[in-house]
């Protein structure tokens, strides 16, 4: 492995790759990466750098997809998690066959006010509207990033937008939100959008949670979407009940499939009804960006995300990039707004892990865009100084 001195030399005259995931709620992948590159180039004018935008299926995925393809953005009006109409967008590939959909763009938590956050009522209907629009424009392949959702409706809203009817035991059509899950007794597919039968879905997610149970969607994620203890119990019961209805209707047991609990059960809903394929968002985006071929001559990789800890080694972008770097013999440094489990991260192989947030700075201040950019610049300067001593 390279010494610190040789890493310092790569900053001066080498070929450096910057691939930083978004600092959620603060900077996009491109903004974070460009801040690092601007600083490197100001300190080391002879250093060659390349920015590779990256994401793992959550917020920022669409931007990354569009930056690595020659497609175009399609704007439309659709319903947010509280069924309010907003202007949103998705991407379509150059050949018009593939749609790139970021669930967070239409069913994401930041789209609604804190007092509206209630997974018993929030819905994925808008995500279904984007899929339907893309189907009607001729798309038959879909890449859907399902991170950052405000919902725990198991994708039922999405299904309703695509023509599925969810009925109670009396044959009455049900409304929206996680509160309907325990009431679903029948699923009518008579009016489902005809083009769905020829469509293929790849679902990008960065979690491995099963559908329900102690590690399931409701137990692990519903609280951050506005649920209290009672709601979490009700949502989990509803998901158990609906999983049984799915088994009876389709013959598919989605309950323990890793990732089926992603995005409040959206992963499981897409597996069951859209014949979807679940893939690691990090792997998918790294493949689409041709990451391995782009780094073949690199001397150093700088990666990171808003928060880096032991979970970053479990399928997230920094961990995946570390794996590739180790395989290729390229040292990897990580920067993040918040760093935990530093010893474990260093033991895993990172050559350095650095927090951009000063200890005396509040999180609110650190998340301001101009402050976050300045902090990244300061930490790169600090890294460069330390490597050269």
Image: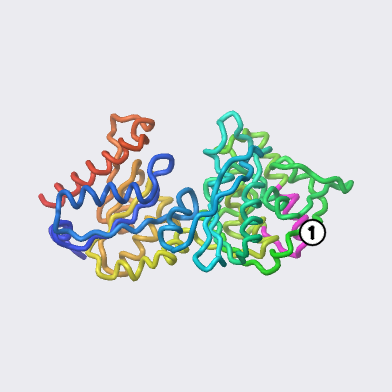
Q: Quadrant of residue 318?
A: bottom left
Determine whether, in the image, residue 72 is placed left or right of residue 159: left
Q: For residue 12, what is the image quadrant? A: bottom left
* 245, 43: nearer the viewer: 43
Residue 352 located within the stretch drawn in magenta:
no
Crowding around mark 1 (Cα neighbors within 10 Å: few <14, some 14 to 19, many 20+) is some
Residue 187, position in %: x, y? Answer: 80, 55
Residue found 57% across the figure and 45% down from its top: 106
Residue at the image position 45 percent from the left and 58 percent from the top: 66
- Magenta stretch mostly in which secondary structure? helix
Number of numbered labels in the structure image: 1
**Depth check: 290 or 71 in front?**
71
Q: Quadrant of residue 278?
A: bottom right
Residue 127 x/y as whole percent: 62, 50
Q: Nearer the viewer, residue 87 or 101?
A: 87
The reply to whether residue 307 is in sight is no
For label 1, the residue is 189
On the rendered image, what quadrant is the N terminus found in? bottom left
Color encoding of the figure = rainbow
Percent position (x, y) of residue 138? Answer: 62, 65
Q: Is residue 243 magenta?
A: yes
Compared across the picture, whether 173 is left or right of 236 comes to: right
Residue found at the very far right of the displayed protein: 170
Magenta span: 239-254
């Amino acid at each position: 492995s390279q010494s610190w001195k040789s890493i310092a030399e790569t900053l001066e005259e080498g070929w450096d790759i910057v691939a930083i995931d978004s600092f959620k709620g603060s900077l996009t992948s491109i903004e974070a990466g460009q801040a690092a590159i601007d600083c490197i180039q100001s300190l080391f004018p002879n250093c060659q750098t390349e920015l590779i935008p990256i994401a793992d299926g959550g917020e920022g995925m669409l931007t990354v997809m569009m930056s690595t393809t020659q497609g175009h953005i399609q704007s439309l009006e659709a319903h947010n998690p509280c069924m309010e109409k907003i202007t949103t967008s998705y991407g379509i590939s150059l050949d018009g066959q593939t749609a790139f959909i970021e669930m967070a763009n239409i069913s994401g938590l930041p789209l609604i006010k804190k007092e509206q956050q209630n997974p018993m009522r929030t819905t994925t209907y808008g995500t279904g509207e984007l899929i339907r629009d893309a189907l009607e424009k001729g798309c038959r392949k879909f890449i859907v990033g399902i991170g950052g959702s405000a919902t725990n409706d198991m994708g039922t809203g999405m299904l309703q937008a695509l023509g599925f009817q969810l009925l109670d035991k009396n044959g009455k059509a049900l409304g929206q939100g996680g509160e309907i899950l325990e009431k679903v007794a029948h699923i009518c597919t008579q009016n489902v959008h005809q083009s769905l039968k020829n469509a293929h879905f790849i679902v990008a997610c960065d979690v491995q949670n099963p559908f329900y149970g102690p590690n399931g969607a409701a137990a692990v994620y519903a609280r951050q979407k506005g649920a209290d203890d009672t709601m979490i119990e009700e949502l989990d019961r509803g998901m158990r009940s609906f999983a049984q209805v799915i088994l009876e209707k389709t013959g598919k047991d989605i309950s323990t499939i890793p990732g089926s609990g992603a995005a409040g059960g959206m992963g499981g809903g897409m597996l069951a009804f859209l014949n979807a394929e679940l893939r690691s968002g990090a792997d998918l985006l790294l493949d689409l960006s041709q990451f391995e071929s782009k780094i073949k001559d690199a001397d150093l990789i700088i990666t990171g995300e808003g928060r880096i800890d032991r979970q970053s080694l479990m399928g997230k972008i920094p961990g995946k990039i570390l794996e590739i770097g180790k395989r290729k013999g390229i040292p990897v440094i990580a920067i993040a707004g918040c760093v935990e489990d530093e010893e474990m991260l260093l033991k895993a192989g990172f050559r350095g892990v650095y927090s951009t947030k000063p200890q005396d700075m509040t999180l609110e201040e650190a998340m301001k865009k101009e402050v976050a950019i300045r902090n990244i610049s300061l930490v790169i300067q600090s890294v460069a100084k330390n490597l050269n001593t």
